[in-house]
Image (spheres, rainbow, N blue to C red):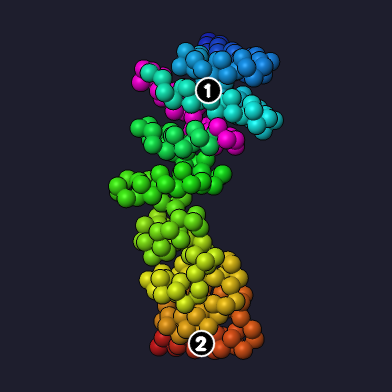
Amino acid sequence: MVFQGEEEKASFLSFALEQRQEVGLRYLRETAERLKLRTFPLEELLETLGRIEQCSEPSLLVGELVKRIEECSQEEVDKIANTLMILDTGDYTPAGRLVIDRAVQRIVPKLNSVSSRELAVKLVVSKRVNRRRAAYKFFRLRGLDDRSRALLVSQLDHDALEAPDLVACDTELVQQLGLGRVLDMASSTYYRMRAIQCAMEFQPPSEIMLACSEYPQEIVWAVFEKHQKEYLPYMMRLLDEYRSDAYLLNRILGCIGKIGGSDEIIEALETVTGKLDNAVGLECS
């Protein structure tokens, strides 16, 4: 930086030092508050959590609780969940509700106890979208139970399902709803593949292949990931059916390479070699 004179340089340095001091004081205050929270017993932290809408630094309080959860007993985790349960039912200002939303989003997925599962089931039907998202994240990490499955099915029946990925990754729901229906509602190729993997646990290959007629990429991916050798004849059929689709052909070849024997691999390579030779011929013409 070039200064016009010593006075300008001195003015800039004075300003920079003031800014440095302000930033330092802000960080110093935050560090002191964080360390203060670290000295609180859990009961005192939970008492503060119970009135978090009045807390001057709610993110620091939540951060301290999140750090402690791994060391908490099941009884202590239940106490945290019960405190959040009470918070969820309170009447707060819009700003207070937002603070609680953020606390729920950060804390709930970290919990794992009977009370925390009850809390997550309750949050699934919350009017607050971020609290529902916290519940969905909890169930992604901890798995579904009968109550949460029933709620998701009810949401689906009322065209209000927000987390189709939870359905696609749950074997019981895939079996209850049918693979075809789950494939149609799944949000991405990945979750369709996961639904197929769930169905592989209870459906024979012939039925799965029929349900996946519109989803060749997903079935190839599922077979590859699960190393399902009983699907080899079907992969050989797909090899012929999609010989004009280079992208899918590559996926099928990789799958056959993983689950097939030498004869199947040689046959697959012959198909691919012909495809590559034709492509080279077109490039040279």
66 above or below 18?
below
Label 2 with label 1: CB-CB less than 8 Å: no
What amino acid is at disc 1? Thr
Q: Point out the image quarter for the C terminus.
A: bottom left
Q: Which secondary structure is most common in the magenta stretch?
A: helix
Residue 131, how many percent across, how many down?
43, 33
Q: Secondary structure at mark 1?
A: helix
Residue name at image x 45 percent, y 48 percent: 149
User: Is residue 97 on the magenta stretch?
Assistant: yes
What amino acid is at disc 2? Thr
Residue name at image x 65 percent, y 31 percent: 74
26 above or below 229?
above
Residue 271 circle label: 2
Residue 9, how many percent across, how many down?
55, 15
Q: Point out the image quarter for the N terminus.
A: top right
Residue 190, how many percent across, how many down?
47, 59
Q: Which residues are magenta?
A: 92-115
Q: Secondary structure at mark 2?
A: helix
Q: Please tell me how crowded label 1 is: few (under 14), some (14-19), or many (20+) other residues with Cα within 10 Å.
A: some
**Comes first in the chain, label 2 or label 1:** 1
Residue 194 circle label: none
107 above or below 207?
above
Place residue 181 in its image quadrant. Answer: bottom left
Residue 83 circle label: 1
Pick the residue in front: 3 or 229.
Answer: 229
Q: Is residue 182 visible?
A: no
